[in-house]
Every structure is written in structure tokens, then in C-alpha cells.
Image (cartoon, grey):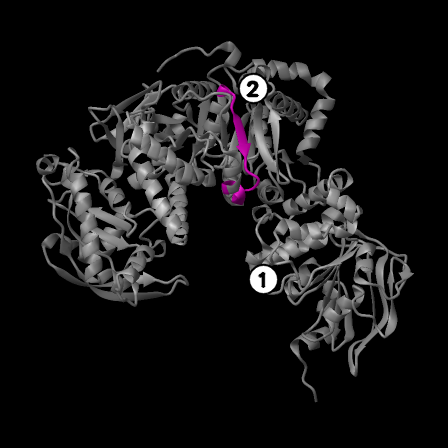
Amino acid sequence: MSETMGDPQLDTVPKLLARNAKMYGDSPAYREKEFGIWQSWTWAQTAKEVHALALGFLTLGIKQGDHIAIVGRNRPHFYWSMLAAQSVGAIPVPLYKDAVADEMAFVLDHCSARLVVAEDQEQVDKMIDVKDQLPNLANIIFLDPRGMRKYDREALFDFTDVQAKGLAKAAELQGELDARLAAPNYDDTCVMLYTSGTTGRPKGVVLSNRNIIETGKNTSEFDSLKHTDSVLAYLPMAWVGDFIFSISQAYWSGFCVACPESESTMQDDLRELGPTYFFAPPRYFEGVLTSVQIRMEDAGKFKQRLFKWGMNVAKEVGPNLLDGKSVGLGDRIKYQMAKLFVTGPLKNTLGLSCVRLGYTAGEAIGPEIFDFYRSLGINLKQLYGQTEASVFITQQPDGQVRADTVGIPSPGVELKIAENGEVFYRSSGTFVRYHKNPESTADTKDAQGWVATGDAGFIEKESGHLRIIDRAKDVGKMKDGSMFAPKFVENKLKFFANILECVVFGNGREMCTAFINIDLTAVGNWAERNNIAYSSYQELAAHPEVYKMIQSHVEEVNASVAQDEMLSGCQIHRFLILHKELDADDGELTRTQKVRRNIIAEKYDDLLTALFDGSTEISTKTEVTYEDGRKGSISATLEIRDAAVFERAKVAA
Amino acid sequence: MNAIDSYITPDGRTIGAPVMEMKNITLRFGGVVAIKDISFDIREGEIRAIIGPNGAGKSSMLNVMNGFYHPQEGEVHFRGEKRGPMRPHQIAHQGIARTFQNIALFKGMSTLDNIMTGRLTHMKTGMFSQIKWWGAAQREEVENRELVEKIIDFLEIQTIRKTPVGRLPYGLQKRVELGRALAAEPKLLLLDEPMAGMNVEEKEDMSRFILDVNDEFGTTIALIEHDMGVVMDIADRVVVMDYGKKIGDGTPEEVRTNQDVIDAYLGVAHD
């Protein structure tokens, strides 16, 4: 780990703000759409707002080291609140605004928050509900006074009133504020972010000024972000990504952060704004692509043909142009035509016209989806990260973008792959500790600063890119000793629209097998077009034609898996199509729609045995839970099919 | 009833002197008596509900208040003055706005334009000035647009600003209609079944908006509603009608325990 001292002028975020106010005083720092018009604040104005609020915090008696919680959707005022908190030496803690009162109570209690900056009545009501459990919580500041006229104002203040009160006492408090601005050093806490807590209680990840500023600096240089860039901040403020994009990188580079008018207008706002830098999870890109496809299906014949032609040209030429490879003159002309008539207007509609840098992360993205956006000429790249790393672990450099890797280590990051395939990293962004949780800190981060990601992966020899295979705890070995990574294969299968969900088995066995769930909408649509009649999900799932189609998908996946040197053993030898959809109500999926492998293996024990013992048919009876809690059962006879598998050498030849 | 006194609601708002007084109103359609000798008042800053079973004469009552029907007997006093027969636009100029039971919006126009129509009574520039556009007409449009945008923000309908209202779901259309009524900056707002046909969540939202309108703008509100639960939650005082007669008047608590009201709602055995 580099133990550099930060530039003393620039070792806290408030100091970056002061620099930006001087260097880029008249450039926009924030935009927000209000009353149908984009309002903007320059860096100089932002510095004034933050200054007034920081003085206001002092009038409320905020001490150094206090925690200040921030709850609301992305708005400039909340970003200012974080800066004002840091200015007075307090630690900002952004919270998920959708959390229920009890979840908030846990976090507020855990960090002993003294002050909450809340958006509106909805959030204030939650705080009032749990206030009795929180002896440390002294005051609440709100932004939108609506509906709170009758509230007891003793400990409840209007945002602008706090600023005004601060300014009124400026002469008295300025000295104190200056002292507090100068006090922190590079290793003091910058922010605390709570992990979403999919397993157990949320953990407070403490990130230092070093973490945030080094990350902002390194990654801004990596992608040459400039103060003329702009980003739309629409992902939850409590999520580390938003903090890194909208504070760390934005303050380092001095670019503009825009906030949507409301959550539901994000797509319109994106189009009006046309940011140059854009981040979205794969889910978002999938959703947009699907809506484009559906709308094209409803369009007239001429438009459909034009769209098809334009997209084909874009697909052939677009990625090469992005990667800077040589492209013939004819292709260039065709590409310009396609841009004029198809891809240009489409990009504009999606609000991505000006995007010069886009990132996606969080889960695997389907190669078709990825290619679609890249053919439009959008420089969409992948990164891999987590809260504990201040996001960045690896990212893809321009010209080396692929759907199946997550890129090379980000600047300042060292990677290490453990015996069992688990990925470890160490970097200047590595978190300081979990708040009040030394055991978890010790479990995650060792004495040398190496942090376990919980993901298994490997580094490709030729390119040096990291590839993530699966969660480390799901990775196993097959009987012949080769690696077994179910999610790697499942993701490939799920990229087919016809396959909704699948579960691959094979840990400790000679071969891999799979349960497959068809996607009723996609397959139903396909059945309609192919004159296949069916009356129920179960009937459709068992239809021989459906089996044939799914088999072709499985074999296609096998062919692709066979090319992978480490995972070629994970080809699916036998599969069956399940007679019911896997459902969270039956405990087969988590509430966030993730497969619960062990429970499924137990519940469908008979099917699993049949997959491995060579039978071609199996009768089974399954208990189902209806939405109102009643239970019933369905019986079915399922066919088991063999799928063709491939030799690695044969395919490679 | 004493016209000067005021009262304080359980949640601490001060309710002022009567804004509108209905004195011995009787309304007949030919031989049918829709409203029979009803008197009540609506006070400054109050949320006043009129409830009753189907056909009780609630909407007729609202139409009398609104000046759309002229009662054969009785007087309507608005701000202390007796009101003679008036045209609808004159009523609007007095500061009374309403919504309708069966949404009456311009289906082909956007949400924004629909709400802008609510500002018409406040526009003063003439036709020629409007055609010329620059100058006074433009200034006026900008001022009005600003107020309309505040209403859009208030009702949280930014997403549908430019959507033709005919394409909106029912609950949202109701909200747009409320927006249009608010755009007139009414002193007295009449709502005809604002929650009819809504699901629980939409009802909760609408109740919130009604309370907020009252709270933020100090608007006096009279509403007709079917859903007893909602009425009991948001109204300060309730008039209960049955077969054109007033059978109860008072706070929700008083009305709830009134034997005549219970009989009208739950039915009573006739010997």
C-alpha cells in the first residue's frame, strides 16, 4: 500500500471544494430540475451554501467526530450537507431512504447520530417514531416543510433557517470553523457507509480521506475525467458508488453533478441533460433494451427494416471504431448513414448522446446487451468493486473492453488469487474498519491489508484481465478435480431470453446437470408464433418443442463453456425443465430473487437423483405455497434429456 | 348560530368565521324535492364534509353552493353577503373552485395545459395582446406557469407534465383535476367525491393532498365523500344528509354516535 501523504492543500473533501470554487468558480457544480426548469449552482455558489450550512451546524452544537445522518433522494442540498458535516469535523452517514423506521433506528443507534438531515415529512415521521430509542439524536433538519406546519419545532429545523442562523452568527463562529477545516489529516474518517446487509445486520464501513481522495484522483486520471464532464446522480446516496462518482470523482475533477426532478422522471431528465459520464447496473441496460425492442415490434414495416439495417451496420462497425481498430472507408460511410437515421436518434431518445464514458457493474451483463450499447458507439465498460474498496478493484481500460471480464486492476490496486480461487485485493481505497465491529474487520482484512472479496475468480494470462467466476462459497470441485462454478454456467444460460432461471449441480460429481425454468412471457410468445398450443405453464414447460429449443440453448452454452480452459468441465450433460417457477414464497429464491441452491437441492431431491442416475423420466409431486399462504401440490412427469458436450481441443481447432 | 365565534380543532388549527352560509335551502326538480330546508355553514380554514347514502342530495347541494343550481327557497351567503343568481365564471371570480364526480378534464390536452386552464380567471391581457405575445402577455404566461409548476410539484405529478390526460389512469386524472381547481387559487374548494373509485393507496395519497392543501394554502374545503373512514379521518365537521334532509351536523365523533345517522347508514327496522 502506498503510504503517501496527501497534498496538505487537498487532503479533505472540503479543501477540494475550496480549490474548485477558486479554479472553476463559474462552472456548474450542481444542477437540479425544479418546477420544470433546470436550476444550477456554480462551484462558488456551492462553497457559499456549504459554508452557511457548516456555520449552521456549529450553532446546533455539532462536535468533531459526531455522526450526521442524511436521508433523502439525490438532491444538491444533501451533498452540501455531507460537505458541511466534513467541514465541521463531523462524519456524514447517508442512509437508504426506503428503509423502514426500525432499520433506520438500528443504523442511527449504531453510529450514535446526533443530527439527521431528512428530506421531507415522510422521513421526519420515521425519525419521530424511533426518537425515543435514540438518546443521542438531538436535532432533525428537513428540506421540504410541507405538511409539517403543526410539528413541534423545538428540535426540528428548516434547512434554510439553519443556514440563515449560521450566517447571522458568522462573525462569532468563523474562527471555530476555520480551525475545524484545518484539523483533519489524511487518515481521518471521511464518510461512513452502511452495507445493504443481505446477510445479517448492516455494517458501517469507515472510509478515510485517503481512501476517498486517492480513489477519486487515480480513477479520474485513468479515464481522464475533466471539469467539463457531467453525471446524473440517481442511484441511492447511501450506496458507495454514488459517493465515489458524485463526491470523490466530482470534487477531484470538478465536474457537474445533476439531480433528477423526482425518482420517476429519471429517464426524461437523462434525455434532457445528456450527461457525458454515466453509471447504471446491468438491470437498467437490460430494461432499456427490452423496451426498445418492444417498441420496435410495434413500429411500421419500414421503420423495422431501417432499424434492423442500422443496427446490423452498427454491430459490425461500432465496436471496432470504439476500440480504435482500422475500418474501411465503405464501412465508415455506412456507419455514418446508420448514425444519421438510426443509432443517433436512438441514442438521443435514451439520453446517451453525449456519453463518452459509461460503466456497469454489480452483476454479469449479457454479451448481447453489452454489444448493443457498444455498437451504438457508447463507450460502456465494466468495473468490479465493493464498498470496502471505495468501489474500484478492477476496471476496463479503453480499447480492451469485453463482456466476460471485469478489467485490469485499477490504479493503486494489488490483486492476489488465493488457493481456493478467492480474489483478494489491497489498495489505497481499502476501508479503515467496520464501525464498532473489530471481529468482522479482522475477518475481512488481514494485518497486511489484504481484503477478501468473497468472490472467486482468476486472472487471464494473455490480457491480465480479472474474470469473476462465482461467489467463493459456491465454487467447488468435481470428482475429477476440475473446478466447478455453477453461476458461471447459469449466467450464460440466463442470457437467453427463454430461460428465466436455472440451477446447475455438480459439486463432487462426475458431471454437471441443470434444472431449468422457462420464461413464460418469452416462451409463450415463441409458442404463439410457432402455433404451439398450451394451457398451462406446466404443459408448456413439458412440450417436446420447448425441450428441443432449450436443448439447443444448453448445447450452445456447452460449446462456449468448452472453450474455457479452467471451467470446461462444467458443461451440462443432462437437464430437465422444472414444472413450476422457482418462487420466493416457496423459499426457493431469496426476496431479492437469488437462487437458494441448498434448499432447492433438498426439496427436489428425487429429481436430482434422477438427473444423475441416467433415467429418462421421473414422476414427482411438489408442494407449492399460494400467495395467501395456503398450500397445495402439483404432480408431474418430467422428461430428462442429454445434451451434447464438447471437447476443448475440438472446438478450439 | 352565532356568526362571529370561532373554534379550535383537536389538532390545534383555529377555524374562523363562516365563509359560506346555507340558510333554509330547498331545491325542487318539478315535483321531486332534492333538498329540503337545509341550513349549515362552512367556516374559514375548515375541512367540511357532506356525507349521506346514494340519492341523499349531496351533489345537488354542492351544485347549489357552486351556483350551478338556484334553490327555490332559502339563501346562500358568501362572505357575509347574500348571493343572487350568478353565472359560473362569476362564481369562479369570487374564489370558488370545484372538481367533478365524473372527471371533466380536456382529454386531449396535456396535464400542464389542463392545469393552466385553471389560471384563466386570473389572466387579464386581452386577445390582441395575447396574439402579439411579447410584453404583457408573455409576462403573464410566465407568472402563471410558475404557479402551475408549483402545483405540479405539490401534487407530485412531474412525470406526467406533458402526457395527454386521456392516457392517464383514473387516480392520476383525479389528481390533475384537483390541480386545475387549485390553480384558480380558490378561497373555497369544493370536491365532489374526490376518492370515488380509488384503491386504498390512492385514497391515502388523496387524503394527504387534501390535508396539505388546507394546511399549506389555508384553503377552506367542502367535500362530498362516500368513504366514511376517510371522512372521519380528515374532516373537521360533517353534515349528514338523507332523502334531502339534514339528519346530523357536528364533529366526526358527534356524527358517529348520532342515532339518526346510524339508522340511515345501517338501515332501521320499520314497524
- Kindly identify which chain the residue marked by label 2 belongs to: A
- Kindly identify which chain the residue marked by label 1 belongs to: B
Q: Residues within 10 Å of mark 1 (few under 14, many from 20)?
A: some
- Residue A155: % across, % down: 67, 36
Q: Residue at x 62, y 65 (%)?
A: B196
In which image quadrant can residue B250 be found?
bottom right
Q: Residue furthest bottom?
A: B271
Left/right placement of residue A537 relative to residue A420 reads right
- Residue A337: % across, % down: 38, 36
Left/right placement of residue A178 relative to residue A239 reads right
Magenta part of the chain: A252-267
- Residue B230: % across, % down: 65, 61
Q: How many marks?
A: 2
Instruction: Note whether A97 is above or below A582 in the view shown.
Output: above
Q: Are marks 2 and 1 on the same chain?
A: no
- The amino acid sitting under disc 2 is Leu
Q: CA distance from mark 2 to mark 1?
A: 49 Å
Quadrant of the drawing holding the N terminus of chain A: top left
Task: In this rendered view, identify the residue nearer to me: A11 or A550.
Answer: A550
Q: Are marks 2 and 1 in contact (CB under 8 Å)?
A: no
**Label 2 sits on residue:** A17
**Label 1 sits on residue:** B198
Quadrant of the drawing holding the C terminus of chain A: top left
Task: In this rendered view, identify the residue nearer to me: A54 or A380.
Answer: A380
Q: Residues within 10 Å of mark 2 (few under 14, many from 20)?
A: many
- The amino acid sitting under disc 1 is Met
Residue A599 image label: none
- Residue B35: % across, % down: 79, 75
